[in-house]
Every structure is written in structure tokens, then in C-alpha cells.
Amino acid sequence: MISTNKEIPEFSIRYLNITSLAGIIIFSLTIVVYYYFAILTITRNSLIVFDRDLQYTKGSVVSITESSFAEGGEMSHYPIFKIAFRYQVGDATYTNIGYTTSKDIRQGDELNVSYKESNPKISKAATLKASPFGLFVLLGIVLPVAGLLLFLQGLRWGNNFVLMLKNGAIAYGQLLSVVRNGEDYKHYYLYEDGDGRKRRVAFKTSDKKVDERVRILYDQHDPDKAEVLNWNNLPILFGRNTIRRMLNGGK
């Protein structure tokens, strides 16, 4: 057995390994960006249709600019225009924005505007979309999901690595073969468990160069769960030195 359970930095291994941490960062940053650029826009405009204090007035187009968003594909590409419009409620004048692919709207055109009576700043022009949509909004949805999946992948690795440390032993593996897998390579090593049975483990890397002999950490309760020890790629940000000391026999 490599160590006692108290020695293992389980939190760091599970949640702060490189894969988990990358997933957390991607998820958090994209959620923040998506919130400010999409959710706030939708909340400020579209959701007023559910309000009981909805009122209507006339507004006019103040400015028209082409946004960075677009609809359609390569064959049908329609730019989305950002429309600023102004409207008056009582003695106060307000300005808001909407989006459209129509090229027929001109500065000074009249628009029908709905607004919250309790907060006239929240409004929407009837013929305009409350938020642009296209590639950037799609990325705003896809990237948080990708970050979450990356985090779960890192968490899964962390759980397996913790179990191997709790029940682990070190063996030496001998290179069997190198197989190209797309742009990466899989190095296959043969090792012997505590019962003297021969087992195989794969090590995936972008480097074709291989070591003929490596150290392998495996679970004594389930020797098929094994991992080639590679100090440069050990995905532990906090507790790395503790892990190295444990795997080196306390040195």
C-alpha cells in the first residue's frame, strides 16, 4: 500500500487537476459572458411580455449599425443590424436597442414599443428581436456544456486516481508497441501485478518518442486499473509534491 488515506490530497486530485480546473474555468467564464451578453438582454426586453403592467407607446429609430452577428450559412448570409430606438413616457425619454435582418428600416422610422409601466426603461420594439442570435449565441450555449463535460472527465480521472493511491502499488512496465491514433500515439506497456499476472496498460501522448521502461501505478484490488507515471504530465496543481513523495516511497 502506498499511503494512508489521510496523506492523500483528495480534493486537489478530484477538483483541481488540470482537466477539472480547465472545465471549471471554461464553464465559469462562458456562463458569465453569456449572462451579460444574452440573458441580461433577453431579461431586459423579451420577458416584459409576461408582465401585467405592460403599456404601449410610439418610438422612432435613432441609429442603425451592422452587428457582428449573422443568420444563415455560407450560401445565405444575412447580417443582423443593431437598431437603437427612442421613445417617450410622460416627460421622460428613453433609449433601447433591438436587432433585425431587415434592410428596410431607416433612421427616423416609427416603431411600436411596449414597456413596463413600473419601469419604463425595460422595453421592446414590436418588429425587432430582443437579442441577436447566430454563432456567438450558439457558442454561449455549447461552451458551458463543453466546460461541464471537461470538468466531469477530470473528476472521473480524479476519482480513479484517488482509488489507485489508496489501494495502489508500483510496478515496472516494459514497452510492447507504439500505435498511431490520429495525431496522437498510444504506447503499450506490459507489467506484472502482485500475483505475478501479466497485464497491459496504454499511455496516450502526442510524442512518438517512448521510454522502454516506465513506472506504473495500479490498483491492487483491480489491477486492470493502471496508469503510467509521467511526472511532466501529472495533472495535479495543488498537492503535486505530496503525490510525488508518496509515489517515490516518501523520498
Image (cartoon, helix red, strand yellow):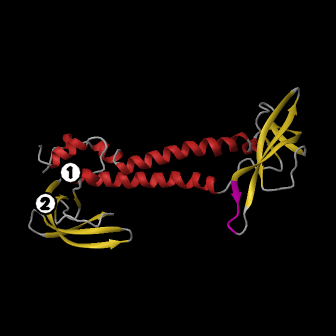
Q: Residue 228 at x, y = what percent?
A: 22, 60
Residue 63 as seen in the image, left or right of residue 175: right
Residue beneath the point at 29% across and 68% down: 186
Q: Position of residue 104 (x, y in %)?
A: 87, 55
Q: Quadrant of residue 200?
A: bottom left
Give the mark, 2 or 1, whose residue is nearer the N terminus.
1
Question: Along the line of sight, which residue is nearer the eye, 145 or 78?
Answer: 78
Residue 112: % across, % down: 88, 44
**Which residue corresponds to mark 1?**
165
| Residue type, mark 2 in image | Ala
Q: Report if residue 73 lies within the magenta region.
A: yes
- Residue positioned most to the front: 209
- Residue at 48% x, 55% y: name it: 146
The percent position of residue 60, horizontal first and vertical second, equals 88, 41
For this view, does 98 lie left or right of residue 240?
Answer: right
Q: What whole-number distance in Å separates the C-alpha atoms at marks 2 and 1? A: 13 Å
Q: Which residue is mark 2?
A: 171
Residue 52 can be seen, yes or no: no
- Give the magenta part as a residue range: 69-74
